[in-house]
Image (tube, rainbow, N blue to C red):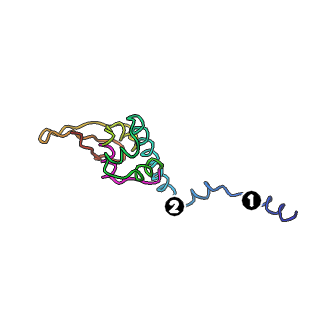
Amino acid sequence: MKKIKKNINKKRIDPIFEARKNSNFEKYSKEADIKIRIAEEVFFMRENRGLSQQVLAKNAETTQRVISNIENGDLNPGTFLLFKISKALNFNSHNLARIYDCSESFYVMNKSTGTLNTYMSKSIAGFSLNNN
């Protein structure tokens, strides 16, 4: 009985408070936030288009497992994979703005090449997706 009372009287540690003490906490927190936003956007756009993970994977030239990992927030796709998924789901500037938490997005037409580029104003200025 005494052992139980000793354990009860021990100071409880708040794991979030302890994690925030780590110098890398904010970096990891931001990375996790982006993974979650990508997961949500890919999932909702895929569902809205009535596509299975397998069909999306085929259209994006990847595997169903990769799509599943992205939608579960277990995988942060690189730029090229995100671009392929974006094309397969017909993402527009608003989809990308939600992923990257940008308040504004705008199109710029390159007259010489005829390409339309999408730019976001916050944190990733200069990121472009060619929409032909």
Q: Position of residue 32 (x, y in %)?
A: 48, 52
Q: Secondary structure at mark 2?
A: loop
Q: Residue at x 31, y 42 (%)?
A: 88
Choose the circle earlier in sequence order: 1 or 2: 1
Question: Foreground residue, 99 or 104?
Answer: 99
Residue annotated with mark 1: 11
Residue annotated with mark 2: 23
Q: Residue at x 72, y 57 (%)?
A: 12
Quarter residue 21 falls in: bottom right
Kindly report the secondary structure that dominates the magenta region of the rendered protein. helix
Q: Residue at x 42, y 53 (%)?
A: 65
Q: Determine contact: label 1, label 2, CB under 8 Å.
A: no
Q: Position of residue 50 (x, y in %)?
A: 39, 35
What amino acid type is highlighted by mark number 2?
A: Ser
Q: For the N terminus, give its image quadrant.
A: bottom right
Q: Is residue 68 left or right of residue 115?
A: right
- What separation in Å lies between label 1 and label 2 (alpha carbons)? 24 Å
Q: Which residues are magenta?
A: 73-87
Q: Secondary structure at mark 1?
A: loop
